[in-house]
Image (spheres, rainbow, N blue to C red):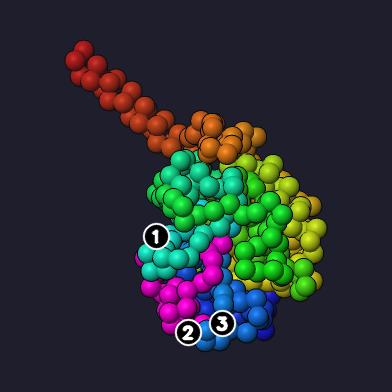
Amino acid sequence: MLSNNTKRAHTPALQPIVPGIVGWRNVFVNLYYINEQEVAGIGRPWVLLDAGLPLSAAHIQEYAAQLFGPANPPQAILLTHGHFDHVGALPDLLEAWPTVQVYAHPLELPYLTGLSSYPPPDPTVGGGGMAAISFLYPKKPLDLGSRVKALLDDRSVPHLPGWRWVHTPGHTPGHVSFFRESDRTLLAGDAFVTVKGESVVATWQQKQEVHGPPAYFTPDWEAARASVELLADLEPEVAATGHGIAMHGNELRRQLQELRDHFQTQAVPTKGRYVGHPAVADASGVVSVPPPVISSWVKGLVVAGLVGIAVAVLRRRDKESG
């Protein structure tokens, strides 16, 4: 049974979300095993949502075998978006599952077919360790070639007839979430998350709180705001996100509505590379990005360095004149 008052220490890495959906916490990012028949079992068909971190393919396959039996690959792999922590195991998984097709939004395809890198992260926003080291995260696109296809315009989801996809851009141009109307289950990806994703401590503890998309990797805040509004209007009963432990019921809806109503103050940084100046992208990938913002600590180092140089020059002059 889902709880809205739990943390990492009280939850297993492999956790049932609702009947038919099991989530796996892959270090700090989540992926989901989905069975439309709502009961896992040997030989049952299933779909994988997102593909976790690099070097995690063996664990993904191991858990799949536990849930659905060995030699039973997914019918498809669905992607909310193509950031490194959501597609890291894809190359190894596609090698192990040579007939499995990947699906993503058309605007996400440039980053999955080698055409474009994502806009650079902004390590100056978010105020946490995950944000501070974001400049180290992989940014180069995968090239899945013909193994990735665009989701259909009719919003249907391959092999999941009870679901529809929802375009939720902002965190990435082609970010999508998935919604099942029958029980109002929402798989939100990183359109919003249920942990403060910029903080190392919060990410480790996994305290359940609704937050905006991870700030350091969000290049279009106006689109992100509109996406949160769209998802809040769905009034989900359960939300399982890309980061954090799933939440449910009135507390989920209350926090999500609060984020919607106060998005500017709760989610948008006061300043940053993409604040007021979004990256521009089209069907071919990134078109333009604003210049980087120099953080205050970097400015401090520069000022300190200039002061040090000035002091050294003055001392040398004094020595030469003496």
Q: Residue at x 47, y 78 (%)?
A: 72
Q: Is residue 33 magenta?
A: no
Q: Residue at x 59, y 47 (%)?
A: 106
Q: Is residue 72 magenta?
A: yes
Q: In the image, residue 254 lies at what x, y percent?
A: 78, 65
- Disc 3 marks which residue? 44
Q: Is residue 236 left or right of residue 301?
A: right
Query: Can residue 131 be seen in the rendering of this structure?
Result: yes
Label at residue 91? 1
Task: Assign the N terminus to one quadrant of the image.
Answer: bottom right
Q: Is residue 241 left or right of residue 142?
A: right
User: What is the three-letter code of the residue carrying label 3?
Assistant: Arg
- Which badge, 1 or 3, is on the more N-terminal residue? 3
Quadrant assignment, res 257? bottom right
Q: In the image, residue 57 lies at what x, y percent?
A: 40, 69
SS under mark 3? loop
Quadrant assignment, res 196? bottom right
User: What is the three-letter code of the residue carrying label 2?
Assistant: Gly
- Disc 2 marks which residue? 69
Q: Pointer 3 and pointer 2: residues touching (CB < 8 Å)?
A: yes
Marks 1 and 3, how far apart at CA:
24 Å
Quadrant assignment, res 310? top left
Q: Which range is magenta?
A: 55-78
Q: Residue at x 71, y 54 (%)?
A: 154
- Which badge, 3 or 2, is on the more N-terminal residue? 3
Label at residue 106? none
SS under mark 2? loop
